[in-house]
Image (cartoon, coloured by chain):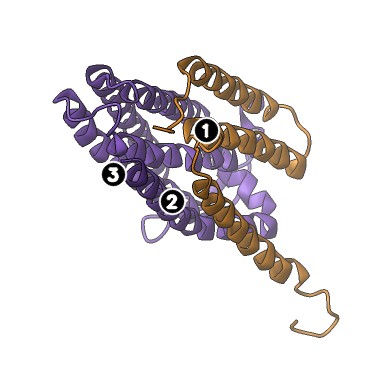
Chain colours: A purple, B orange
Amino acid sequence: MEQQRESSTLGMWIFLVTEIMFFGGLFTAYLIFRIAYPDVWDMGSQHMEFWPGTINTVILLCSSFTVAASVYFIQRGQNKMTALLLFLTVLMGCGFLCVKAYEYHNHWEEGTIPGPLWTYNTVHNPDGTTRPAPHQLQLFFYLYFVMTGLHALHVTIGIGILAVVAFWAWQGKYTAEYHNPVHISGLYWHFVDLVWIYLFPLLYLISNKHTAG
Amino acid sequence: MSEHIFPIRACFLVWIALMALMILTVFLSTVPMGHALNTIVALIIASMKAALVLLFFMHLKYESYKLSGVVFGAGLFWLLILFGLSLVDYLSRGTSGVPGH
């Protein structure tokens, strides 16, 4: 049992490292273009809505807590409590996706979907004049949609996995000795949280928009 | 059974710390410090949050089996190579004095 637990944990960590490298490529692209076009990145960040982003951060941090707590309870063999906490996590995950969908909808309305749907070509200055939007703004939104979209896909997968594990826990499948699936899927959920911990400041917080109102 | 049981109190304290750091980073983002510094401060706080999640929620601090930590460390090291060597290329372009390089 001990050896099973250790090897499944190790296997999950190796998988998570491949995931880190997967997202790492996108973060590298973000970094390079952020250095090349700092003003455009600032402008792009001003299009991010502060409250939905912050609410989603709170949701994910809380859901990581419920997952960590569910591992604590399953280590004591308390299946029902674990199922309840995982169910809460699934609900929070769905909440996260709803907020994300709301944001995507607003970008759709605004015309800031890169590609043929892009209609955001004029920027209104505070003094009432207008200027053409920089081309690189599409690049920011391209990275925004790929990074948050890929993250949302991971959230969706995480919801599916945790829902199944919650169901099995409710049926009393796990014991204090055997609960690898809870621990392993918990690691996956924490990883999803980790990615968002970096996405939130990099996308939402790099401009000072919300001081200006 | 050498699996370490992560105390629920620590779990709760880590969650409080994560929320406090989140409020701090949101607050500091409203303090104008200039482009670069604002981003660096936000990234330092994000890394503190990430460290809390990794060490406590993901049990890296408690795992009796240290190989998970080694695997994660190797992943982090390769990520830094990816960032570092890519930037060495992009940041040094146009500095050699040779046209087109």
Q: Residue at x 40, y 54 (%)?
A: A15
Q: Is residue B81 left or right of residue A96?
A: right
Q: Residues within 10 Å of mark 1 (few under 14, many from 20)?
A: some
- The circle on residue A40 is none
Q: Which residue does the numbered mark 2 point to in the structure image?
A: A16
Q: Chain of mark 2?
A: A
| In this rendering, the label closer to the viewer, 2 or 1 | 1
Q: Is residue A182 visible?
A: yes
Q: Residue at x 56, y 35 (%)?
A: B61
Q: Residue at x 75, y 81 (%)?
A: B101
- Give the image quarter of residue A156: top left
Horizontal and vertical percent position of residue B34 = 78, 39
In whole angstroms, how far apart are the C-alphas of marks 2 and 1?
18 Å
Horizontal and vertical percent position of residue A164 = 19, 36
Quadrant (top left, top right, bottom left, bottom right) of the C terminus of chain A: top right
Q: Is residue B39 left or right of residue A57?
A: right
Horizontal and vertical percent position of residue A205 = 61, 35
Quadrant (top left, top right, bottom left, bottom right) of the N terminus of chain A: top left
Q: Which residue does the numbered mark 1 point to in the structure image?
A: B62
Q: Chain of mark 1?
A: B
Circle 2: residue type: Leu
Location of residue A83 with respect to B45 vertically, above or below: above
- The circle on residue A157 is 3
Helix, strand or loop under label 1: loop
Q: Residues within 10 Å of mark 3 (few under 14, many from 20)?
A: some
Q: Is residue A127 visible?
A: no
